[in-house]
Image (cartoon, grey):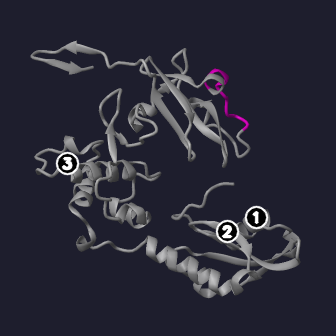
Amino acid sequence: MKQPDPGSPLTFDEALLIAADLAQDSRTLTTYRHRGLETARYGRGFAFLQTIGTDRGDMDGYVLVTTISYGSGLLSVGGSTIDTVIAEHLARAEHANRDIPDSELSMAHRVALEAYDLGLTRISEMPGRRKIGAATADYAEFILIALRRSNNRGESGRTILARNDFLMQSPATGRRYTQPCPRCARPAIFQERYPRAVCDHCRSRTTDRTGRRVTGFNTHSSGGMIAYYTDTLGDSDASGSHKEACVEVTRTGVCFVDGQPATMQEARFGGIVVQMASDYRPRRRWLGRGLRNR
C-alpha cells in the first residue's frame, strides 16, 4: 500500500478506499464523522467504524486514515473509544510537528544541525569547526547520520528531530555511538556485533560480482534477506513485479564495495548490514608527504 503523503490533500473517497482495504470486512464499514480530525492542522484524516470477528465473537473496531499514517484495531480492549483513538492520534501529530526551542538543544544537536544544513556527511568537514570533546563529537556524528537517513531531505533538521524523540534524548554516559567505516573512514553507526559494518555512503555502492548495484531488504518482519538490483527498484509497481532479484547475492551474501569483497546479511534485530570481508585491509598509496587512505 502506498505510504501517506503529509503534504498531499486527502479526500474522503481516497480515505474510504484505503479503509476498505484495511478493514477485516469492508461490508461492516461505517463513517464516523469527527470535525476535529477532518480539519486538523496536523494529521488530518477520516475515521471509520468496523466490526471485527474474534474468537470471542464480533467486536467493535476502527480504521483511521490520515495524512501521516493508516491504522486499524479493536475498540473493546481497555475500554477505548473511537474518540480516544482520534485524540491520541492528534496529540502525536501535534507533538511531531512542534517547534523545538534552542534551550532543548545540546551542543551535539547544534553541531549536527549545522552540519546537516550545510549538506555535510561528517562533523569533521565543517569549516572553522569549534573544538568539542570526543564524546560530544561522537554523539553529534550519530545525530547527523540519523538526520541524513530521513526520507525527505527537504525537511529542516529540527523537523526531523521533532518526529524522532529518541534523537532528543541525552547520550548515555560511556556509550559509543559511531565507528569509522572500514572502507572510507566516514562515521558509521557503532554496532559491537558488526565491527566491519560500512557507512551509509559505502553501503549505497554495494554491487554484485559484475559491478551492478544491489540493495538488500528483509523478506518479512521476522527476518530473511533478499537482494534486488537497485536499478529495478524505482520501476516497480504496487505488487513489486518489476523488481529483479540478484540470486547470487541473496544466496551467498557475497557482495562488493568499490570492487572490494564484502558481505550482506540480515541484522540480528532487523534490517540489513553490509560489512567488509574479514580479510579486507584498506589499500594505501603514497600521496605527497605521508601515507593516506585511498
Within the magenta stretch, is there residue 203? no
The residue that disc 1 covers is: 22
Residue 129 in view in this figure: yes
Q: Are marks 3 and 1 in contact (CB under 8 Å)?
A: no
For image coordinates 54% across by 79% down, the residue present is 90
Quadrant, the C terminus: top left
Give, as a three-letter code, the residue at label 1. Leu
Q: Quadrant of the N terminus?
A: bottom right
Foreground disc of the pair 3, 1: 3
Q: Earlier in the sequence, mark 2 or mark 1?
A: 1
Q: Closer to the camera, 18 or 248?
A: 248
Label 3 or label 2, whichever comes before in sequence order: 2
SS at mark 1? helix
Say which amino acid is labelled 2.
Gly
Residues at marks 2 and 1 touching, judged by CB atoms closer than 8 Å: yes
Mark nearer the N terminus (3 vs 1)? 1
Cα separation, mark 3 vs mark 1, equals: 48 Å
Residue receiving disc 3? 134
Q: Main secondary structure of the magenta part?
A: loop
Gap in angstroms between the C-alphas marked 2 and 1: 8 Å
Residue drawn at x 35%, y 26% is 183
Residue 99, position as x, y percentages in the image: 34, 73
Farthest residue to the top: give it: 286
Please provide the residue range marked out in magenta: 241-249
Which residue sits at x=51%, y=23%?
Answer: 207
| Callout 2 secondary element | strand
Q: Which secondary structure lies at badge 3? A: helix
Image coords of residue 98 (percent x, y): 39, 74
Query: Residue 81, can we see it?
Result: no
**Image coords of residue 287 (percent x, y):** 16, 15
Q: Amino acid at mark 3?
A: Ala
> Residue 150: x and y, percent?
44, 52
